[in-house]
Each structure stands twice: as structure tokens, then as C-alpha cells.
Image (cartoon, rainbow, N blue to C red):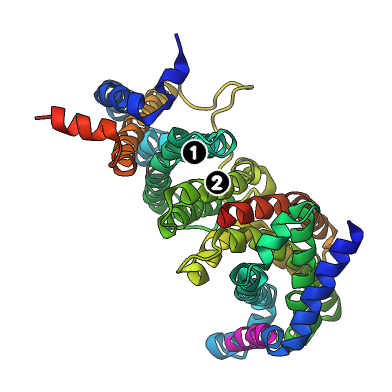
Amino acid sequence: MLAALRTVIRRDLLLALRNKSDAANTLLFFVIVASLFPLGVGPEPALLRGIAPGVVWVAALLASMLALARLFAADYADGTLEQLALAPQPLAALVAAKILAHWLVSGLPLVLIAPLLGLQFDLSGTALLTLMVSLLIGTPVLSLLGAIGAALTLGLRASGVLVPLIVLPLTVPVLVFGAGAVEAAAAGLGAEAQLSLLAAFLLVSAALSPWAAAAAIRIALE
Amino acid sequence: MNWFKYSSPQTFYPLAGRMVPLFFALAALFAIPGLYIGFFVAPTDAQQGESYRIIFIHVPAAWMSMFIYVVMAFWAGVGLAFNTRLSSMMASALAPTGALMTFIALWTGSLWGKPTWGTWWVWDARLTAELILLFLYFGFMALQAAIDDPRRADKAGAVLALVGVINIPIITFSVQWWNTLHQGASVSLTRSPTMAATMLTGMLVMALAFWMYSIAASLLRARSIILERERNADWVREWREAAP
């Protein structure tokens, strides 16, 4: 069982490593979207500090939506997903491994580059740290919820627009508490409450969404 | 009586046909006294004046918007678990009515907010949650519309509806979570209501009217969905030949 999970993770990471531009594009999209906001709203540092948590979080949200297209689509097209569904290991566990690998490739880089964007928006040290921690807890939730949407839309014509349409409403609590944590930290208040709620979302979605995504994959494969 | 007799589209179709006018009549029966109480009997509010009267539309619509999502998720879940076609059709039939109720709640809330709060829209917890509910309905309908195979559309929609139903408790508890501009719930089962009895009566009667309308409209839509899906079945052909 563990060997199978390790194999799935290693395979997906290796595939991502052989095709570096995919992951790099997501990261680049994140940076560009966040960098457009100062151009749109003006360069006043006070204003930028105010909108920074929301802007960085929304940019991360959009970037992770874009990355979802890669989660199952290639495996669905070449039949790998069917083999995974036939494997003796439970599909939900294999899907969880795929989601973890996907997050390592597309979510973790966002967390690591976020402080740089925070600096552009003149955030303080504690706010930067909170931004990183909130993204570290929050982006896996985005990958977990997004996996359901990616699995539901497998093989559909308009899946590119459809995935954000059905997943984004579900990610609202993550955005509210993720950006809220950074705002609280920037205002000098403790962010523990928001971060704890984010962690609760992570635990609940980690427990439930691999099952939902596995069910959705079986529906798509029928 | 065997309830499962009506779980097949063929037997449900004529039953629904008889129930639609009945529930439309019930909706009118409740709406007439409900609106009369709302506009003529209920006293003018001391602080909000006459503008509060929109709650006789707003509150029932908001209740129905959340309730229909739960019912829709229930039927979708039944369809997914027991592979019953009619349950999934019922879920698909409920979605547009639910979206309509959500839209009415947002629209009338906005009309009420302008004279009372001085703004058409505030980013308050309950308004935002209602807006997200509207997005969830749209997502459900968009997903089902994008899938050509009706069986897959049913099942995929069911998974999405069950995932989305997590949003309903968030709506209910969001008042306590964020607690901003929007007033707290005025109607509660555990303590006495803070509004005049006639206002409450009018609202409850209107809620019944909305409920009956929702049942009638979804049954009507379910009939269309049955006809569309079963158009090649023998019973539909016989029914069409028998019909004038």
C-alpha cells in the first residue's frame, strides 16, 4: 500500500521534473497577476499594504485553478487513470497521493515565492511570515477541493472554464480566513484563530475530498 | 400502499401531471392571504417604516433558497446511491427553482438595503453566503449542461451537490462567525420572536406559498426532463399517440 503511494508520488514528481515549464508557468502566472495590481490601483504604499493579503491570496487561488488542468487530464487521456482505478489499492488513497504530488509541484512554489510578492506590497515581517504560513496551510486545501472539480470535468469540452466555475465558490472560506490571517497579523493582532480554522479546513478536506475525487473519477471512467 | 410504484418515470409522469395544478392552486391559496396580511394587516415598523414589508417576499425566498439546495442534494445523493433515475431528474429539476429563489432573496434584499442601510449592497456575511449559494447553483447547472451523457451528468452533479451542501451550515452559522452589518436572525424556535405576531404570521403564510410554488414548478420541470430523457421509450410513444 505505502509502496504504491510512494510509486505514484515519485512518478508524478518525475513527470513534473521532466516537464519543468508547466510548474514554472503557474508560478509565473501567480507573480504576474499579483504584480498587475499596483499598476491598476496606484503605487501608494498604504493602499498596497491594505490590499496585499487579498491580492496575493486571490492570485494564488487563480494560479492553483490553472494548475488543476494538469492534475488528471494527461492520465485520463493515456489510460493511466483507468489502470489506477483497477489497481488493488483503494483509488481514494492513490488519488490522495496524486494530489500531494500535485501540491508539491504547483502549490509549494507559490508558498515559497509569496514573501517576495509581499515585499512588493510593503508588508511587515510578521505579516510576511503569516502570509507564508497561511498559504502553506491553505494551498493544499485548494488542491484537494480542486481535485474534485478536475475529476468531475474529465474529458469535457469546456473543462478549462468549468473547473474554476465549480471550484471557486467552494474555496471562499479558505480565501476569507487565509487573507484574514494576514490582515490580522498586519494589524498587530494574533492570527492563531484564522490559522486554526484553516488547519481545520485542511484536515476535513484531506479526509473527505480524496473520496469525492475518486468517486468522480469512477463516474468519468464509466 | 406501495410508494415505490411512483419511482419510475413512467408512473411518476401522470402523477406529477395531476399534482402540478394542485400545488399551483395551493400556492395561490397561501399567497393571497399572505400578501393581504403583509400589505394591509401587519403594522408599520417603528424604525424601518413601510420598506420592511419586502421581508414577506425576501425571507421566504431566502429560506427556500437554502432548503431547496438541501433537498436537491438529498435527491442527487439518493440517485447516486441507489441508481434511481427519477431521483436524479428531480435534483436537476430543483436547481433552477433554487437559483431563482436565491436571486429573489438577493434582489429583494438589495431593494430593502437601499432605504434602510443606504446602500444596494454590503459585503456582509449572510449576503455573501447567499451570493455564493447562487454561484453553487450555477456551478451545478453548468456542470450538468456541459456533460452530454445524462447518466454521467446526474452522477457528476450529485457529487458536486453533496460537496456543496457543506456550504449550507456555513451560511447558517456565518451570522455568528462574522457578525457584521446584517441583523441577527429574528425568528428562532427556542426563544420568543422579536417581531409582531401578525408580521410572523404573514411571513409564515408566504413561506408556505413559496414552498407550494417551488414544488409545482419543480414537478413541472421534472415532467419536461422525463419526456426529454425518455423520448425513445415505448410508453412515451404510446402516450403521444393517445394524446389528441
Q: What residue is rendered at 36% in x and 50% in y? A: B111
Q: Inspect the image, locate mark 2, and give the three-letter code of the amino acid beneath it.
A: Ala
Return the chain for callout 1.
B
Q: Is residue A175 visible?
A: no
The percent position of residue A116, horizontal first and vertical second, equals 77, 87
* Residue carrying label 2: B161
Using the numbered discs, state the Cα–Cα distance from disc 1 to disc 2 in whole angstroms: 7 Å
Left or right for B156, reference B169: left
Residue A103, quarter of the rendered image? bottom right
* Residue carrying label 1: B72
Residues at discs 1 and 2 in contact (Cβ within 8 Å)? yes
Asked whether residue B30 is drawn in magenta, I would say no
**Looking at the figure, which quarter contains the C terminus of chain B?**
top left
Task: Give the answer, above or below, for where A60 lies relative to B120.
Answer: below
**Looking at the figure, which quarter contains the N terminus of chain B?**
top left
Do marks 1 and 2 both belong to one polypeptide chain?
A: yes
Asked whether residue A33 is drawn in magenta, I would say yes
Residue A147, quarter of the rendered image? bottom right
